[in-house]
């Protein structure tokens, strides 16, 4: 809390359902709290609230604003939250034409980078739904052209299968 105060934090933003620490910090600092819920929790990762459903849903309901990335997640977690404080904001979705247009714009504005070493980081819980295996496969393809590219996978979870996959590629 001392660090957040020193930084002059005005709003606390929690970018996952999996922790209540942002809500607790916002309450202690008397700052607004925005909760951005991206997962079901129990349905997609098999995790459950540490303090039970009732208490955690109460804490979620106390947020100044709650954002869900889909109607399904909103109805699952935010059904008891005041509708004036709950919103659905989908993750960025664009058509293939939009991606092509954005790619062309980026190419026109890009300054060529002549670097042969890149480091990518994938940070979060290690779980099949997070796409770490796909990232390892993508890195294997990228390393054909950039042999010094590397991928850091950072987070809690079982890594043996991922290490084995990386070694095989």
Image (cartoon, rainbow, N blue to C red):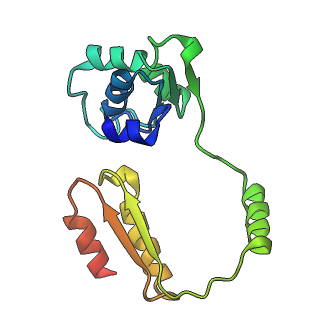
Q: Is residue 22 left or right of residue 52?
A: right
x, y percent for residue 141: 48, 80
Q: How many marks?
A: 0
Q: Does residue 54 sit above or below 142 in this rendering?
A: above
Give the quarter of the image for residue 159.
bottom left
Give the quarter of the image for residue 61.
top left
Which residue is found at the position 39% from the left and 71% from the top? 136
Q: Is residue 135 left or right of residue 165?
A: right
Image quadrant containing the N terminus: top left
Image quadrant containing the C terminus: bottom left
x, y percent for residue 70: 54, 31
Q: Name the one closer to the observer, 62 or 72.
A: 62
Q: Does residue 32 sit above or below 8 in this rendering?
A: above
Q: Name the one closer to the observer, 58 or 97.
A: 58
x, y percent for residue 15: 44, 39
Q: Name the one closer to the observer, 70 or 12.
A: 12
In this view, the residue farthest toward the front is 6
x, y percent for residue 3: 34, 42
Q: Name the one closer to the observer, 56 or 135.
A: 56
Which residue is found at the position 51% from the left and 88% from the top? 116
Q: Does residue 140 sit above or below 83 in this rendering?
A: below
Q: Does residue 25 sit above or below 121 in this rendering?
A: above
Q: Is residue 7 left or right of residue 124?
A: right
Which residue is found at the position 56% from the left and 12% from the top? 83
């Amino acid at each position: 809390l001392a660090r957040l105060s020193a930084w002059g934090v005005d709003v606390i933003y929690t970018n996952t359902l999996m922790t209540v620490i942002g809500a607790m910090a916002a309450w202690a600092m008397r700052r607004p709290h925005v909760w951005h819920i991206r997962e079901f929790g129990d349905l997609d990762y098999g995790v459950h609230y540490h303090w039970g459903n009732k208490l955690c849903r109460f804490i979620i309901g106390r947020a100044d604003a709650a954002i869900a990335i889909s109607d399904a997640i909103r109805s699952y977690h935010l059904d008891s939250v005041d509708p004036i404080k709950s919103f659905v904001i989908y993750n960025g979705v664009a058509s293939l034409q939009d991606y092509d247009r954005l790619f062309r714009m980026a190419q026109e504005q890009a300054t060529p980078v002549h670097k042969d070493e890149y480091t990518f980081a994938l940070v979060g819980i290690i779980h099949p739904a997070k796409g770490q295996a796909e990232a390892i496969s993508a890195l294997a393809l990228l390393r054909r052209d950039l042999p010094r590219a590397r991928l850091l996978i950072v987070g809690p979870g079982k890594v043996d299968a991922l290490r084995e996959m990386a070694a095989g590629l």
